[in-house]
């Protein structure tokens, strides 16, 4: 580990700036707030599209052919020219000043026509004026392989948000999702001790519901 210490006039060292090192060896109980994020129960009731029109053709189902882990992934097929939103059905309530981490794996067989976003957004029919978080642009996805998408942020207020997996502006496309996570880091590690996005991207493996981890 490489870290820095501030040395005062009295010759005493200050605090270690790398908080990852401070947590090494400690055990934490951690919760994935997304239920069925790997779709291993073979159902899709936790996910919905904004389109509920019988005239609109769409397909949203589990898939066993292309998956990142386990037996299933979520397949979303848009075969018309109308934009779609794909969200988790239950909104997530953020706590002000808490730090959060979100992640999903995405697979596309062909380049998207109108790439969308992976984010948390405060929309309920009309704009709320609340901040959005994430906005991970899907335009740079590599085709025919699983892409890891993640974002890390501190909530600026307490509010209920939609967890958006994908926003397709327009166009025919097929996209697969798997191993989706959303974690309240402050709840788990305490304020000021939250791991960085880079650390979590590298070390945190997918889990359903609750797990116990030892800081590496």
Image (cartoon, rainbow, N blue to C red):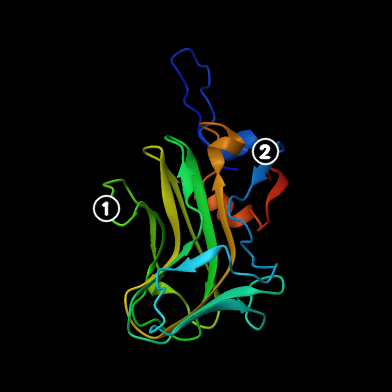
Residue 148 appears at what percent x and percent y? 53, 66
At 48% from the left edge and 41% from the top edge, which residue is drawn? 99
Label 1 crowd (10 A; few <14 / some 14-19 / many >=20): few
**Residue 147 position within the rendered picture, expressed as x and y whole percent measured from the top left:** 52, 71
Residue depicted at x 47% and y 37%: 98
Q: Secondary structure at mark 1?
A: loop
Check the image and report above or below for 25 versus 104.
above
Front-lying residue, 137 or 78: 78
Q: Which mark is residue 24?
A: 2
Residue 5, percent from left and from top: 51, 29
Instruction: Identify the secondary structure beneath mark 2.
Output: loop
* Residue 194 appears in the rendering: no
Position of 201 compared to 212: left or right? Answer: left
On residue 195, the disc is none
Name the residue rendered at 67%, 38% in the picture.
24
- For the point 64% across and 61% down, the residue is 36
Where, quadrant-wise, is the C terminus in this rendering? top right
Residue 127 shows which numbered tag?
1
| 127 is higher (above) or lower (below) than 84 | above
Callout 1–callout 2 Cβ contact below 8 Å: no
Give how far apart the Cα atoms at labels 1 and 2 are.
Answer: 42 Å
- Where residue 104 appears, x then y in whole percent? 54, 63
- Please tell me how crowded label 2 is: few (under 14), some (14-19), or many (20+) other residues with Cα within 10 Å: few
Whichever of labels 1 and 2 marks the residue nearer the N terminus, that label is 2
- Which quadrant of the structure image shows residue 62? bottom right
Question: Comparing marks 1 and 2, which lies closer to the viewer?
Answer: 1
* Marker count (numbered): 2
Q: Is residue 104 left or right of residue 135?
A: right
Asked if residue 132 can be seen in this view, the reply is: yes
Quick one: 157 or 16, which is closer to the camera?
157
In front here: 185 or 40? 40
């Amino acid at each position: 580990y490489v870290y820095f210490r501030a040395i005062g006039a009295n010759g005493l060292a200050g605090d270690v700036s790398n908080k990852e090192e401070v947590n090494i060896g400690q055990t934490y109980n951690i919760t994935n707030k997304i239920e069925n994020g790997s779709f291993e129960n073979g159902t899709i009731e936790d996910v919905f599209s904004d389109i509920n029109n019988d005239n609109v053709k769409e397909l949203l189902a589990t898939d066993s052919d292309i998956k990142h882990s386990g037996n299933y992934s979520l397949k979303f097929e848009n075969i018309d020219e109308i934009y779609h939103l794909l969200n988790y059905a239950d909104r997530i309530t953020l706590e002000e000043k808490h730090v959060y981490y979100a992640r999903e794996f995405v697979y596309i067989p062909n380049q998207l026509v109108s790439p969308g976003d992976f984010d948390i957004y405060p929309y309920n029919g009309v704009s709320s004026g609340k901040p959005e978080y994430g906005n991970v642009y899907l335009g740079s996805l590599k085709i025919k392989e699983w892409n890891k998408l993640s974002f890390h942020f501190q909530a600026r207020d307490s509010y209920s948000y939609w967890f958006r997996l994908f926003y397709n502006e327009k166009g025919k496309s097929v996209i697969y999702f798997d191993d989706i996570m959303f974690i309240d880091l402050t709840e788990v590690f305490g304020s000021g001790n939250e791991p960085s996005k880079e650390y979590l991207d590298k070390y945190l493996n997918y889990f359903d519901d609750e797990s116990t981890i030892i800081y590496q």
